[in-house]
Amino acid sequence: MSESPTAPLKTADGVSLKTSLRRAVRRSKLKALLLVSPLLAFLLIAFLMPLFDMLWRSVDNPEVSTALPQTSQALADWDGASLPDEPVFAALAADLEAGAEARNLGLVSSRLNYEKSGMRSAIMGTARRVDTLEAPYKTALIDINDDWGELATWRVIKRESSPYTLSYYLAAVDRQYSPDGEIVAVPDYMQVYVTLFWRTFWMSAVIMVMTLVLGYPVAFLLANLPLRHSNLLMILVLLPFWTSLLVRTTTWIAILQSQGVLNDMMVALGIIADEARWQMIHNKLGTIVAMTHILLPFMILPLYSVMKTIPPSYMHAARSLGGKPFLCFRRVYFPLTIPGIAAGGILVFILSIGYYITPALVGGQSGRFITNYIAYHMQTSLNWGLAAAIASILLFVVVVCYLVFNRLIGVDKVKLG
């Protein structure tokens, strides 16, 4: 008897065709996953893990709770209205004695010193004499260092006993906790980071505009010149990529300094007097000039990739309809290049706010970016929490810029080559 017309089709081994197709799809997906797994592992190890580690360090606060565990526990029920009672001072003495034996008070003293000046000397000085103390510990500790008799000292210790803190983020935006625990602005002479953030953003925007103004005509020539000429011009555009960043930066120092090539030429031509040489290095101007040159190819290449796809017939048709050259360019050609402008603009802007070598070498004090202070806290002050907080804020700004860009223009319209 023949099979029913509604019976499922089967393969030679008796398995239904639908089941066989599902197995084939699963095998193909598994093969694709195995092929991309090295890339996923690389992204996880080289990108995601450092990123999460940075975000964790910006709020991680283990120093006080680890080095002063008995004090942290004793302060848990303290109301903060008056000096703690004798058990808290006894717990501090026990923690300092244990820390002096283990030689692990350096981190906690530095951490508390970030929050209140003088805490490092108070902790280290007391630890050297704590083995000679006898009860009552409250009077003995205050006799060693007056900071132990200040209410603000104990409020700082209790606040920083938490394993998480916002202190690094507050410091990154020139804020701090007051002795009463309120968030207030730091003194004017200590306000650094907000100014640096604004300087980084507006100078990056200026660099982006400069690269657009200089790169647009070059990209236009690349897209419209005959092939033999455009190839030569493309080599000149790509030449900076084959030169060390350090070499290009130091070359601009030689060109722009007071006794440099450009000033010597101006003096020789009689444009400026020898005693009135221009100061073009170790300031904002030096940073903008050097970084515009370094990042110019990142604007030219996206523009060129878009302009090369625009058929010349569009402009010919506009001219044949009676349009003047500039009108045809403004109404026909320029709108078609907006994806390239957007791609080059966001690329240059994001690269600019992340630069720190060039501003450090040619920017002086007035031309440095916020990234230079991230490097300073990572390498010199060793305040990794503050460095991570500044970097996290910078990352957040970049993500916001990306989302705004995607909302207004659309990432799907971006062409990078």
Image (spheres, rainbow, N blue to C red):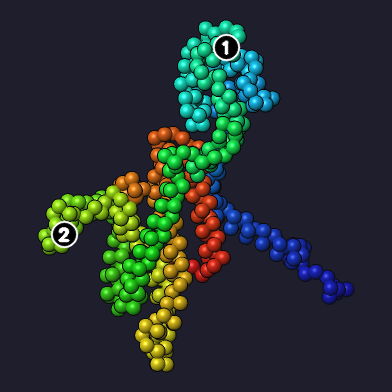
Residue 15's image quarter? bottom right
Whichever of callouts 1 and 2 sits on the residue coming sooner in the sequence is 1
- Asked where in the image residue 58 lies, by quadrant, the reply is top right
Q: Residue furthest right?
A: 1
Looking at the figure, which quarter contains the C terminus? bottom left
Q: Residue at x 58, y 17 (%)?
A: 92
Residue 272's label in the rendered image is 2
Residue 62 visible in the picture: no
Quote the CA–CA distance across marks 1 and 2.
72 Å
Label 2 neighbourhood size at 10 Å, few (<14), some (14-19), many (20+)? Answer: some
SS label for mark 2: loop
Q: Nearer the viewer, residue 357 or 153?
A: 153
Q: Quadrant of residue 373?
A: top left
- Element type where label 1 sits in the image: helix
| Image position, residue 102 (x, y; %) | 51, 17
Give the residue type that dot 2 points to: Ile
**Tag 1 near tag 2, CB within 8 Å:** no
Name the residue located 42 percent from the left edge and 65 percent from the top edge.
344
The correct choice, above or below, for 164 with respect to 413 in the image is above
Percent x, y for residue 267?
13, 58
Q: Is residue 326 left or right of residue 156?
A: left
Residue at 52% of width from left, 46% of height from top?
A: 392
For residue 325, the mark is none
Residue 293 location in percent, x, y? 31, 59
The residue where tag 1 is placed is 139
Q: Quadrant of the N terminus?
A: bottom right
